[in-house]
Each structure stands twice: as structure tokens, then as C-alpha cells.
Amino acid sequence: MKRLIMAVIAAALGSGSAEAAVSGYYDSVEQIGVILGSSEVADAVHQAPIGAISNTGTRKDGAKEWTIRVQECDLKVYLIPVLPDGPGKTTYRLDIPGSCE
């Protein structure tokens, strides 16, 4: 019985850490979703159709740099990670320092 209780506790503790980790695929889906769902990005590109969206690096403060290509403009936006208070996924706050002219 004691072994069964220990196994249940170990399984419960082990599953908590697995749930906290988000794969790179789902993290990038989260980031792209923030960008594409932003009315501020739509305004910054003047509602132009998107030709490409690429992760192009990381800013010195850790913000993830994305470049959105629309017609003749490459708009750089930054996603600042917002860590959860406990187990959970990282969300992102958008920083748009410019716009297309």
C-alpha cells in the first residue's frame, strides 16, 4: 500500500512539470496569434495583405522580434514574454515601435 501511495505521488508530481512545458510549435503559434489578432498591427500596416511573417531574432531585453512583410514594407514588432504566476503557458505583450509609410 505504501508503494502505491508513493507511486501516485510521484506520478502526480511528474505530470505537473510536463504540463508546464509548452512545445516550441505551440509557443510560436501563440506568438503569431498575438500578432495576427492585433488591431494595432493591422493599423500599422494600413490593412495591407501580409506576404510573410518571420521570427527574425531577439532584442537585448529578451523580446522576440518578428518581421511582417506587406507589399513594400517590412514592419518589425516585438513580443515581450509575460510569464505565468504558476504553472501555465507564457503569453506575450506586443510592442510596435513603428509603422509602414
Image: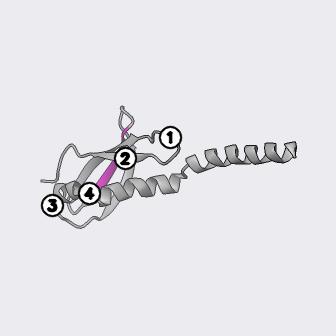
Left of 65 or right of it: where is 83? right
Question: Mark 2 belongs to which amino acid?
Answer: Tyr
Q: Which residue is mark 3?
A: 46
Judged left or right of residue 18, residue 78 is left
**Side of 53 relative to 28 (left or right):** left
- Indicate the position of residue 48 as horizontal and vertical percent values: 19, 65
The mark that comes first in sequence, 1 or 2, is: 1
Q: Magenta residues, as a range? A: 63-68
Q: Is residue 60 left or right of residue 1?
A: left
Residue nearest the viewer, comparing 93 with 4: 4
Q: Who comes first in sequence, dot 3 or dot 4? A: 4
Secondary structure, mark 3, is loop
First of labels 2, 3 by sequence position:
3
Q: Which mark is residue 38?
A: 4
Which amino acid type is marked by label 1? Answer: Gly
Identify the secondary structure beneath mark 2. Answer: strand
Residue appearing at x 37%, y 47% in the figure: 92
The relative height of residue 33 versus residue 20 in the rendered view (above or below) is: below
Establish if 62 lies above or below 98.
above
Amino acid at dot 3 = His
Residue 89's x, y, as percent?
48, 48
Q: Residue at x 18, y 46 (%)?
A: 98
Decide: few, some or many residues near mark 2? Use Cα within 10 Å; few <14, some 14-19, many ≥20.
Answer: many
Instruction: Report the Cα–Cα distance between label 1 and label 4.
Output: 26 Å
Determine the image quadrant of residue 38: bottom left
Q: Nearer the viewer, residue 47 or 26?
A: 26
Principal secondary structure, stretch drawn in magenta? strand
As drawn, the label of residue 86 is 1
Sequence-earlier tag: 1 or 3: 3
- The numbered disc on residue 92 is 2
Regarding mark 1 in the picture, which secondary structure is present there?
Answer: loop
